[in-house]
Amino acid sequence: MDIQTSGKDKKSNTGTLSEYLDGTKTLTVEELSRADSLVWELRDEWMYRWHRTWERGLVSEILLFARSIKQLGENKRVNLLIIFGLELEAAAMDFDISLFNSYLQSYPDLIRILGGTNGSS
Amino acid sequence: MALPEKNTKILILDDNFTFQKKIGKLLWEEGYDLSFTDREDIFLKRLKILSFDIILINTGTEEIDYNNLCKKLCLGVEDEIPVIALIPPCSDFSPAYWLEKGLTDYLRGTGDSKNPWDNWEILAKVGNHIRFQKHSLVLKQRIVELEKSNLDKDNFYRILSHDLKAPFQGLVGLLEILHGEYYTLSKEEVQDYIRSIHDSTKRTYRLLENLLEWSGLQGGQLIWTPEETDLRFLVEDTIGFFKIGARDKKISLSCDVKPDSIVFTDRRMISSVIRNLVYNGLKFTDMGGEVVVRVKESVDYFEISVDDTGVGVHPDNLNRMLRSGDPESTPGTAQESGSGLGLKLCRQFVEKNGGQLWVRSEPGKGSSFRFSLPKRKVELSNIGKNSGQLLRSKKGKAAG
């Protein structure tokens, strides 16, 4: 079972967001196949939500975005989305503005990875 | 961690991430929602796209053009939002400097790197300013409501005089004839005039009674009280006021309404609309002309039209009439005066009853003032939502 459901301790088994972003950790074929059906949605409806959250920068909306995307990841069994949601939520709750801004900013890269078009993977 | 309950949004300009974490935690735990940035352009953009309740600016934030920022904060719509300057202890600028720039208040840094700002002071100042701002908004809202209420009352009294003027003009005219020509008139003619005066006085008295009853409601505020209304009866009854005036001006005044045209509407308001439109029709129609009130029925609504063969309205004047600003009056073909309120009043009443009012007019050919009344029962909450859009001009078409 490669799906992380909760807790940071499990993250080490599945990789961190930074590892996915820098290409140290890559998606499995199964993950890519499951993510494939989501990419369109992530580029369209979720991109709009992300853009709104990014523009307004409200902590409440960042938390909501993080929790919703984590939920989406859990529903669709896409680990990278769960990790993104968890780490973004943790950064927002810690008021680590630099970190949650950098996580938020990485959302388009996330879609590229899930779509299998990340240069480094 | 729960989401903030107060829904009070704070925009914070600060480039020190350690400070941000401390202030963020402190304010979030108090239930405020926060938006942080260290860039001037993002700060100003967020102000444009989102309504914040208070702004905190760390005046030690680098690469900020404070002159430009303060100018924009104090001149734009943002000048309503309290702005607190967070002044680091090492700052070259005094609190007075920032207050002179137009910021609302300030907080001086403690000089302690672990606790750069006094938490209690931050919470107290933010809380106070938000309270002041909310009170100020309530006061502004009350002022707007009071001004509107005052205007409604003014309008009401002007309407009162406007509606009473027409029947009295008719009465005065008849009495002048009786007074001047009493000895030359036959007994039958005198009786005829007296009957007319009696009928007109009764109608005027009823109108006065209605208006006074109306004024008693909610201290002059007009309350929508719909009831099933027979349009034929309403039109015939209403134009009865103008029979004498029409006869004097030798204008044919008639109506064309099918029986059982039943509509759920405020009878008094619609009677007033018809009264005003007929009054205008007679006012702007020359001797020998015609004014007709018609009611057409369609699936969803009744359309009531008051058509005249009068002087018509020039497109420029039509535009002026349709504007919702101060009403202006134009003298009639026999120099009849008016308050200019009639159309404004008609529009308001038709809107209150869920309908629309529009006009077709051509100079020299006449005008057709029309309004619709929905057949279905209109919910009170839906009324007046399209205020300002309902009086529509349909230019370039001749009057009916």
Image (tube, rainbow, N blue to C red):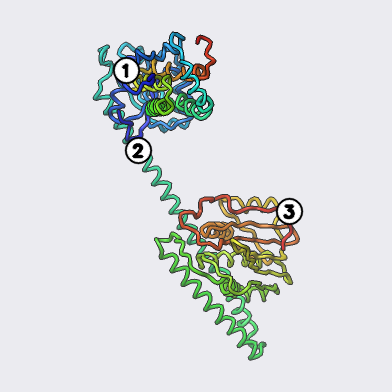
Secondary structure of residue under mark 3: loop
Quarter containing the N terminus of chain B: top left
Left or right, B131 with respect to B50, comes to left
Residue under label 3, please give it.
Answer: B396
Q: Residue at x 49, y 54 (%)?
A: B382
What residue occupies the far bottom of the structure in this picture? B187
| Circle on res. B134 | 2
Left or right, B353 with respect to B23, comes to right
3 or 1: mark nearer the eye: 1
Q: Marks 1 and 2, Cα distance to the nearest angstrom? A: 42 Å
Q: Measured from the top left, where is residue A100 in percent x and y?
A: 39, 19
Residue under label 1, please give it.
Answer: A8
Q: Measured from the top left, where is residue A29 in percent x and y?
A: 48, 16
Task: Give neighbour class at mark 1: few <14, some 14-19, many 20+ (Cα, 10 Å).
Answer: some
Q: Amino acid at mark 3?
A: Gly
Eyeballing the image, is B319 above or below A109?
below
Secondary structure of residue under mark 1: helix
Q: Nearer the viewer, residue B47 or B291?
A: B47
Q: Residue at x 53, y 76 (%)?
A: B203
Q: Measured from the top left, where is residue B87 in percent x and y?
A: 33, 17
Q: Nearer the viewer, residue B131 or B28?
A: B28
Residues indicated by labels 1 and 2 sit on the same polypeptide chain: no
Quarter containing the C terminus of chain B: bottom right
Q: Marks 3 and 1, Cα distance to the nearest angstrom? A: 73 Å
Q: Amino acid at mark 1?
A: Lys
The answer to whether residue B97 is visible is no
Q: Nearer the viewer, residue B343 or A55?
A: A55
Task: Give neighbour class at mark 2: few <14, some 14-19, many 20+ (Cα, 10 Å).
Answer: few
